[in-house]
Structure formats: structure tokens, C-alpha cells
Amino acid sequence: MGKVVKVGIAQMGVAKPPDTIRTSGLGSCVGVVLYDETKKVAGLVHIMLPDSSLSRSETPNIAKFADTGIKGLEEMLLKEGAQKCRLKAKIAGGAQMFQFSSSKEIMRIGQRNVEAVKRVLKELGIPIIAEDTGGSSGRTIEFNPATGKLMIRTVNQGVNEI
């Protein structure tokens, strides 16, 4: 039995079998798993916001944003021996956690995160193999690089595998 590599909010990490990689607390955030099935290496980034231009920091945390986090994770995986042409993605999260009477853009952060993640993956040429996004419930996800399976625990909805 391997260990579980835990990835916190606005963090990223890499795992190889027999380890798995997990993040919890995915509300409006999006968990992006990139993996190379041949090399059996996977990475996970916990995206909080769509775009690093929203950062007020001189040295933003790259894992916090879709545009910088996914690219940073791709670089980590290539250093671990993954091949860019073999990278695939699975994504989960992007829930609308609160119901607002106003339809202000800022309140649609979950949907905007999902759109930003998809845009960056498309720019990088990484196909999305499976996704579980939207809704109004939080998720915990765990990816097994040995099987390529993503387990998703959704609050009040049990476990799903994609």
C-alpha cells in the first residue's frame, strides 16, 4: 500500500505508484489531474482562481491560478519523465457553492474556474478525458496513477469514479 500525497488549496504535487494523490475542499475550486499512463506519473493542482492577472502579489502563488498552475504542473511532470504528447487531464470541482440573487460575474467563480482550466488545457494541447464539474456540492478527489482512475467523493452524493 502506498501513501496518499495530499495537495492543499492552491498547491500542487506529483505521485507515482503505489502512491495516490488527493485534494479535498473543492468547492468553486477546480482540481486538475494531469497524467502520463505510460510512465504512470500523475500530478494534481488545486486551482482557486481563473487568472493570475487577478493577483495582487508581486510573487503570486502559481498553483492558485488556472493559467499558471496548469503550466507549472506540466513542467513538474515533464521533469518526472512524463512525455508532453502523452499527457491527459481529468478535472473536477467548479461548484456554485452559494446561491446569490445577483448574477454578478464575480459570483460565478466556479464556472469561471472551469472555463479557464479548459481554455489553458486546450492551449497546451492536453485532452480532457473525463470531468465532474459544476453543481452545488463540494468534492474530494483522489487519483491513482497505477489505474488512471479518479475517485470523486461529492458531499451528500457518495463516490463516483471517472
Image (cartoon, helix red, strand yellow):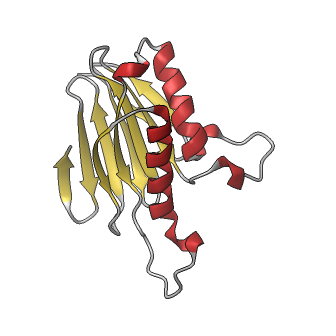
Give the tally of numbered discs.
Answer: 0
In the image, what residue occupies the spot 48% across and 33% down?
A: 124
Residue at the top extreme of this rendering: 81
Q: Quadrant of residue 17?
A: top left
- Name the quadrant of the C terminus: top left
Name above or below for residue 149 compared with residue 152.
above
Q: Nearer the viewer, residue 55 or 124?
A: 124
Which residue extends farthest bottom?
Answer: 101
Residue at image location 39% in from the left, 32% down from the top? 34
Residue 32's spot in the image, x, y percent? 41, 41
Q: Is residue 58 left or right of residue 100?
A: right
Closer-to-camera residue (54/99): 54
Q: How far across and how far down the image is residue 137, in percent?
A: 33, 66
Q: Is residue 16 visible?
A: yes
Question: Is residue 126 placed above or below 115 in the rendered structure?
Answer: above
Which residue shows up at 44% across the image and 55% down it? Answer: 114
Residue 12 x %, y % = 51, 35
Q: Position of residue 147 (x, y in %)?
A: 20, 27
Is the residue 117 above or below the residue 87 in the image? below
Whether residue 7 is visible? no
Residue found 62% across the figure and 51% down from its top: 51
Instruction: Name the image quarter holding the N terminus.
Output: top left
Residue sitting farthest toward the right: 58
Residue 14 relative to residue 135: left or right: right
Q: Is residue 82 left or right of residue 62?
A: left
